[in-house]
Structures are given as structure tokens and as C-alpha cells.
Image (cartoon, rainbow, N blue to C red):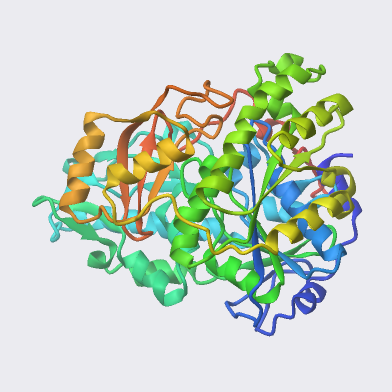
Amino acid sequence: MTDLEIANSVKLKKIKKIVKKLKYKGDVIYYGKYKAKLPIKYGKKNGKLILVTAINPTKFGIGKTTVAIGLADALNSIGKKTVLALREPSLGPVFGIKGGATGGGFSQIAPMEDINLHFNGDFHAITSANNLLCSLIDNHIYFGNELNIDKNNILFHRCMDLNDRALRNVIVANDKEEISRKESFSITAASEIMAIMCLASDFNDLKERLGNIAVALNTDGKLVYAKDLNAQESMAILLKDAFMPNLVQSLGGTPAIVHLGPFANIAHGCNSIVATKMAMSYGDYVVTEAGFGADLGAEKFFDVKCRVGNLKPNAVVIVATIGALKLHGGVTFKNLSKENVDAVIKGMDNLLAHIDNIYNEFKIQTVVTLNRYKTDTIEEINAVIRELEKYNIKCVVNDVWGKGGEGAIELAKEVVEACSWDNSSFRFIYDENSPIKTKIKAIATQIYGAKGVKYTDKAEETIKLLNKLHYNKTPIVIAKTQYSLSDDPKLINRPTNFYITIRDLELKSGAGFVVALAGDMLLMPGLSRKPNAVNMKIDENYKIEGLF
């Protein structure tokens, strides 16, 4: 059975029952039988926070979200009131190469089609608010440009929630030829509005952050903000519903608060602070995830989200697969199904790097789980267990895809044990008040394992400008490939003797951080030669095939 067929085979509970199970007392906004929005209202609990992360993934992913969902179901099955706090899928990967982001097999959140497609309109609202601001910028220039915006120094750009490489570099113009200019689109997941929505503590904070977006430099080299265009109120109007977290459920009946979705390779990779805090206020345990490998999503979860939201995680689960370990060990996709214990052992250097980062750098209790696939052999699985035993690390094998929560009971027990430990040693990698280069170097050397950092001339110029504008004392978000600890996707496993190259930086003053662009990372993905979109079908009864 496909993921979609499995999702459709399970009878879901009415969302009102999930609200009751959550013990939420606010005025719920229902979107049909199985979806709802929750106006921000906190309960009285202070649940333990569990982050699910992974090794560097392959193009097929690691199953991190699948494990997070299965783990939450397993925790509930052993009597621990647990709530999921996850990101929403973007239409880019859904129609691109990666597919949806609702889990897989019997470890999914549902209704699967609705969550993967448009899900209560949140991404569309963000796209609209983003592009409203862009239209106000160009409109201001058209009608006299009282703020003296330098059209060659526009800092805020348009977005769309689809992969479309043709929009990376475009020309925008109107009937006044002299104000035509170069423009670029990012995918909505990389929009600063997305980051602001994820980091805002409440609606007033949201409006303040929207107003603080740096939209351009003027002809005197000073920043022009969204509030100078009086844009924040109209943007907030578009975002009022999207700012409320969504409630759905897992196939096992676990309440899932699903809200917003920045990518971790080009953005900060975590769901909203309000959704996570709401989940923690209604559950004894909260399972959340952060995008891609621990070098990206987990680092940003700690250094950005936890810093801004004053959160302190209790435990981290690192997910690995035999297939990914073999690829890091040098096996090609063509030979991936063949048993290769030596490649598994060699590829474990990547897993060990992530364990070292979480446990020794961030100082958090760490649990390792092997997400089992049908093609895995006993010899390969035992090789992983034996190698980790050399470092006194236990590896728990899970089968959440095939069994749902029942396939993660042992994992759930290990996570409960990890959460019983004192988490007061948790720390950040850098001091946000340190210089920009110091912060980037800390991430590059301590987390990625780089020898150092190189900067292009353009990056050096931008750093000087950020220092001049007093935007040097913020957290750093590094945009880099998810496939490697380095900024080169071909350097797999645990590379050494490499440098991270920063080609430019972008100010996100509303979100409150600076993005450092590493290598050739682009903010607008393109479609593959044969994207998922061309394999999908829908019949006259609206039955969908090919969505996964």
C-alpha cells in the first residue's frame, strides 16, 4: 500500500474529539470534520521538549517526520500524554522531488491530502503578505519615491510557494520605464514573513516585527523599513488567521499542532514558537522536529528558536537509516539494495559527527534510532548497533512505517529515560553579541567540522554594511546544502580539511537574524527533470493518486 492508501484506510477521529483529548478550552475554528485552527491560548502544563533530528539526508530523506509521529504515538501508548508540534509542508517539495511532509506508512498525520495541499491557507497568506509589501515598495517608487528608495538596493523580494527556477532572476517594470529593475523570487518557505511568523511571541510582536523588516537602502545608504511604508497593519490583516496554529491528528489519534514551515537548508527550519509552547502547555511530552540533518535544523532550533523563545530541550533523537549510511560510506544508488556491511560502518562517521555535536557541543541527552526499511539486513543493523556500543551509545531500531506507534515502544522508553536527566547544561554555540565572523566560524568549525571560513568580496562588503547599520549582534542562519556537513553536496560522510565559503549575507531585521549564504545555495529551488507533479492524477470524484 502507498502512504496515501494507508492514510485513507484508517478511520480518523472527528477533530472535536481531538480538541477534547488535548483539553483545549478556547474558541476553536473548525475547518470541516478533521481540521481546526486554535486561537492562541495556553494550558497549564510545562511539557518536556523532545527534538527529532537526523544525519545528513539523501534525496529520499531519512524519515525524520515519520519517526517523530511514531514516537509521539508510542509515548501516548505507554501512558505519557504527548502532543506533536510539526511544520507544514510546502507545495514546492510536494510537486518536486521530495514529496509531502506528513510522515509515511502507519506513522502519518492526517488528513494527508489536505495537509500537503494548501492546508488551511497559511502559506498562501504568507505569500500574499510578502508580495503585498513588494507591491507597496514599487508603488511608492512609482508615485514620487518620497523615501528616496534606491531601486538598485531593494532588500526585500517576492516569493511563491512552488519550485520555479525561471523566477530566480526577473525584471519587474510598469509604464514608467525608468523604474524597471531586477527582481528575484524566493520560495515562500524562505520568506522573511515565514520566519517572523515562526518567531513572533504574540500578535503585537508579529506586527512590530513586520514593521521592522528592512525593505531597502535609500540614496543616503540608510535603511528603509516596512513601517516607513505603513505596511505592517495591512500585512498583519492578511496573516491574522495564519498566525493561529492548526490542529490535526496522527493515524494513532495523537493531537498534532502543525504550524508553518521554513526550510532548514535556506531558512531556520523550525515550526512556530507559539505552536511549540502551546503543545508544551497541553502535553507532558512534546515531540517536534527540525528540517534536514542536525547540522542545519537542529543547530538552528537551538541557536535561533530556543534562544528567541527561551526554550530548553530535554532530549534529542537522531534518526539514521541503513540506506543513508551506505551512501555516506560510498555506495551508489544503483547498488543501494545490496548488502554492504563495510559501507555501513564507514558511513557511520556521519552519524558520529551529529551525535558528538548534540551531546558534546549543545550538551543535550541524545538517543539514536535506526529507522528500519524492508531492504535492511540483520547483519547491517547489527553492525550499526555494535559500532555504537564501542562508544557506549545504544541504538534503538524502530519500525514506525510498518507498525506505527507499536514500532517505537522501545524508543519511547529510552526517550522518557533521557528526559529524566537534568537539562541545565544546555548551551548555545555562540554569543549572539559576538562579531558576525566569530559566530559563523563557531558554527562552521564546531558543528560542520570545517577548518575555517572564506568570504567573497561581496560578503566582506555586506558584513561591513551590517556593522555600519548596527545589525551585527543577531543570531546567524547559514543557508547551505543539506546533503553534506560542508557546503559542497559531493563531500559526503564526515569530510575534513575543507572550508565553508560565504558568498553573501542577507539582513532579516524583522525576524531578528542574518542569513549567511554558503556555497551555491539558492533561495528558489527548481524542479527535477521528472518532478512528482507529472505522476499525479485526480478523477471526477476528486480521488488523488501519486501524492506521497
Above or below, comparing residue 380 to residue 91 in the picture: above
Relative side of 242 to 387, left or right: left
Res 397 quadrant in image: top right
Image quarter of the N terminus = top right
Above or below, comparing residue 55 to residue 470 in the picture: above
Locate residue 498, reporting x and y percent. 42, 23
Q: Who's the residue at 80% across and 51% down the image?
A: 411
Res. 161 visible in picture:
no
Above or below, comparing residue 258 to residue 216 in the picture: below
Res 204 quadrant in image: bottom left
Residue furthest out toward the left: 220
Res 356 quadrant in image: top right
Q: Who's the residue at 22% across and 36% down the image?
A: 460
Res. 292 visible in picture:
yes
Locate residue 224, reporting x and y percent. 20, 58
Q: Who's the residue at 72% across and 72% down the image?
A: 284
Above or below, comparing residue 513 to residue 236 in the picture: above
Numbered disc total:
0
Image quarter of the C terminus = top right
Locate residue 464, reporting x and y percent. 18, 43
Locate residue 157, reporting x and y percent. 35, 47
Relative side of 405 to 84, left or right: right
Relative side of 399 to 527, left or right: right
Nearer to the camera, 421 or 272 = 421
